[in-house]
Amino acid sequence: MIPQFYQKVYSLLRKVPRGRITTYRDLAHAAHSKAYRAVGTAMNKNPYAPEVPCHRVINSDGRVGGYASGTKKKIEMLKREGIPIKNGKVVNFEKYLHKF
């Protein structure tokens, strides 16, 4: 059984379009929570990928962060969507940030 908080986070993340990103913090706030780490855990346990695009969730400082299939894979996926990444960080990430 998938926790209700995870379901809420997955529902919100489905709204982040291709070529856009969000942060663990922004996703937690959109879910009316401060549980940023719980959002990370939900991403790691995401049973709905790629319909729930967990690769689009990054750290608040623009770093790409971890990914269940590896950071290299996450970077490849983001780049395919047109997100520029240099040295493990999204370049000008505010430009690509999805607002809830």
Image: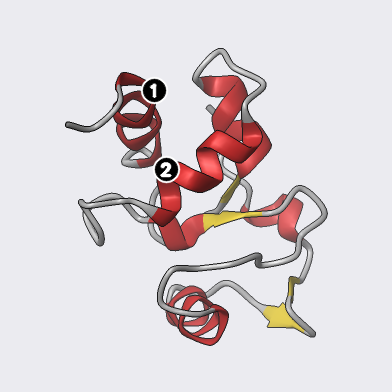
Is 2 or 32 nearer to us in this picture? 2
- Along the polypeptide, which appears first: circle 1 or circle 2? 1
How many residues crowd around disc 2 within 10 Å: few (fewer than 14), some, or many (20 or more)? some
Image x and y of residue 72, in percent = 54, 86
Q: Residue at x 49, y 45 (%)?
A: 41
Q: Residue at x 30, y 26 (%)?
A: 3
**SS class, disc 2:** helix
> What amino acid does circle 1 point to?
Phe
Cα separation between marks 1 and 2: 8 Å
Do the residues bearing badges 1 and 2 touch, measured as CB atoms within 8 Å?
yes
- One can see residue 99 in this view: no
- One can see residue 1 in this view: yes
Q: Residue at x 73, y 79 (%)?
A: 88
Colour option used = secondary structure
Q: Residue at x 62, y 39 (%)?
A: 37
> What amino acid does circle 2 point to?
Ala
Residue 42: numbered disc: 2
| 29 versus 10 height, above or below | above
